[in-house]
Amino acid sequence: MKIVQEVSLVSIGSFEESNDWSIIRSEIRQAISLIVHPPETSSFTIKPIKHGNGVKPIKLAWSL
C-alpha cells in the first residue's frame, strides 16, 4: 500500500519530535508498505465491487 497522506490526530508535548516516535512511525510505514493484494503482487488493488473495500486482505495480512 502507498501512504498518500499522514495526519496527526493527537500531538501532546514534544513526543512527535522524539526518536521513539520516529522509530514507531518508520515501523508503521514499513508494515503498511508490506501489505499487498492480490497475494504475490507488488501493490494493493481494491476490486471495484460491492464489499470490495479491502478490509479482509488487510486483516489476513496482519494475522500472519
Image: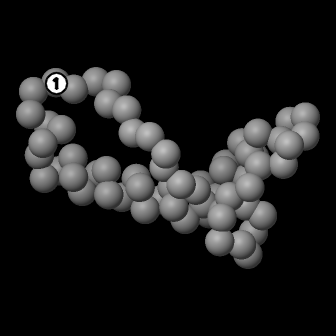
Q: The C terminus lies in which quarter of the figure?
A: bottom right
* Residue at the farthest front position: 4
User: Residue 60, image x and y in percent?
Assistant: 70, 55
Closer-to-camera residue (57/6): 6
**Callout 1: 10 Å neighbours few (<14), some, many (20+)?**
few
* Residue 24 higher or lower than 49, as above or below: below
| Quarter of the view holding residue 7 | top left
Residue depicted at x 49% and y 45%: 4
* Residue at the farthest right position: 50
Closer-to-camera residue (44/55): 44
In the picture, measured across the screen, residue 19 lies left or right of residue 48, that is left
Q: The N terminus lies in which quarter of the figure?
A: bottom right
Kindly tell me whether residue 11 is visible in this rendering. Answer: yes
Residue depicted at x 32% and y 57%: 26
| Quarter of the view holding residue 43 | bottom right
* Residue 55 higher or lower than 38, as above or below: above
Q: Report which residue position mark 1 lands on.
A: 12
Describe the colour scheme in one phrase.
Answer: one colour
User: Residue 35, image x and y in percent?
Assistant: 60, 60
Kindly tell me whether residue 60 is visible in this rendering. Answer: no
* Residue at the farthest bottom position: 40
Residue depicted at x 90% and y 40%: 49
Residue depicted at x 31% and y 50%: 25
In the picture, measured across the screen, residue 51 lies left or right of residue 31, that is right
Q: Amino acid at mark 1?
A: Ile
User: Residue 48, image x and y in percent?
Assistant: 86, 43
SS for callout 1: loop
| Quarter of the view holding residue 52 | top right
In the picture, measured across the screen, residue 36 lies left or right of residue 33, that is right
Q: How many marks?
A: 1
User: Residue 23, image x and y in percent?
Assistant: 24, 56
